């Protein structure tokens, strides 16, 4: 008779302790913020991120193309694998200038890519990227032809010579089509203007993508005085080059 009564009393006492808030020991875990809500579910047909090209090294406008006046837009079609590697590159639309097309596609090989993310996973994809080469309003200075005078056999340029010197003029220029060149060595008249022509040369330059170097020569034995070298390239005169013979 005593055992059941004692058990019941113990049970009641235990229940009273549990229901008393003052008897619950605080825990340091109560200071932590609640966990963030779970991310929204990914829609199986939703595109999360498109592939992207990081054009760290944009193509450089080829000097010869600039000087030739070539310009246009190249449209590249690039295939990127799931790891962001470029696995195929081709020209979808040409600029009609092979040098520009080649420059654009060579630059694409140096770019970095982010793969496309679809259904939460990276997948292979294609990128269509236009590369534009804009023609400058005025040709850069390095496109202009240049003339350097020197004594024949010397590497040093000069503007003064002896009458016993043969004078060499090195003409440096681009020629992208058959180009006639006329060089006139002229003495300066007493009034300071160009006078009589003492020597003339004609050249016919062949087309080339490289800068060409031509030699013009004034034989030795020219009398002392002030002179001009006038050069016309394809009918367009260059600024005259002045020199003196002592």
Image (spheres, rainbow, N blue to C red):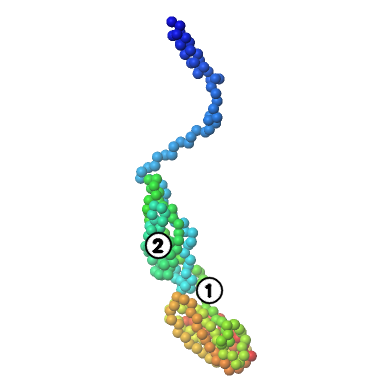
Res 228 visible:
no
Mark 1 vs mark 2, CA separation in Å: 28 Å
- Residue ID at (62%, 92%): 224
Residue 147 occupies quadrant: bottom right
- Residue ID at (48%, 79%): 212
Residue located farthest toward the top when viewing the structure as drawn: 1
Res 163 visible:
yes
Residue 25 position (above or below residue 90): above
Q: Quadrant of the C terminus?
A: bottom right
Q: Quadrant of the N terminus?
A: top left
Nearer to me, 37 or 74: 37
Mark with earlier residue (1, 2): 2
User: Residue 144: x, y in percent?
Assistant: 52, 76
User: Residue 69: x, y in percent?
Assistant: 46, 72
Number of residue marks: 2
User: Residue 233: x, y in percent?
Assistant: 49, 82
Q: Residues within 10 Å of mark 2 (few under 14, many from 20)?
A: some
User: Residue 243: x, y in percent?
Assistant: 60, 86
Residue 173 position (above or below residue 219): above
What's the mark number on residue 75? 2
- Residue ID at (47%, 69%): 62
What's the mark number on residue 142? 1
Residue located farthest toward the left when viewing the structure as drawn: 45
Dot 2 lies on which element?
strand
């Amino acid at each position: 008779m005593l055992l059941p009564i004692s058990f019941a009393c113990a049970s009641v006492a235990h229940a009273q302790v549990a229901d008393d808030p003052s008897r619950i020991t605080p825990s340091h875990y109560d200071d932590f913020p609640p966990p963030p809500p779970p991310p929204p579910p990914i829609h199986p047909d939703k595109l999360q991120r498109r592939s992207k090209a990081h054009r760290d090294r944009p193509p450089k406008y080829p000097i010869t193309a600039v000087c030739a006046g070539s310009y246009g837009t190249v449209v590249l079609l690039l295939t990127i694998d799931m790891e962001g590697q470029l696995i195929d590159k081709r020209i979808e639309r040409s600029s009609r200038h092979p040098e520009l097309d080649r420059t654009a596609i060579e630059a694409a090989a140096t770019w970095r890519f982010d793969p496309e993310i679809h259904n939460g996973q990276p997948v292979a994809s294609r990128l269509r990227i236009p590369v534009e080469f804009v023609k400058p309003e005025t040709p850069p200075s390095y496109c202009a032809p240049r003339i350097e005078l020197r004594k024949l056999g010397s590497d040093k340029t000069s503007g003064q010579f002896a009458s016993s010197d043969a004078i060499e003029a090195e003409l440096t220029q681009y020629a992208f089509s058959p180009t006639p060149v006329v060089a006139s060595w002229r003495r300066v008249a007493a009034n300071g203007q160009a006078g009589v022509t003492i020597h003339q040369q004609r050249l016919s330059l062949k087309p080339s993508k490289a800068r060409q170097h031509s030699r013009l020569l004034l034989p030795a034995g020219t009398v002392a005085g002030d002179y001009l070298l006038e050069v016309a390239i394809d009918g367009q005169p260059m600024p005259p080059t002045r020199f003196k013979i002592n």
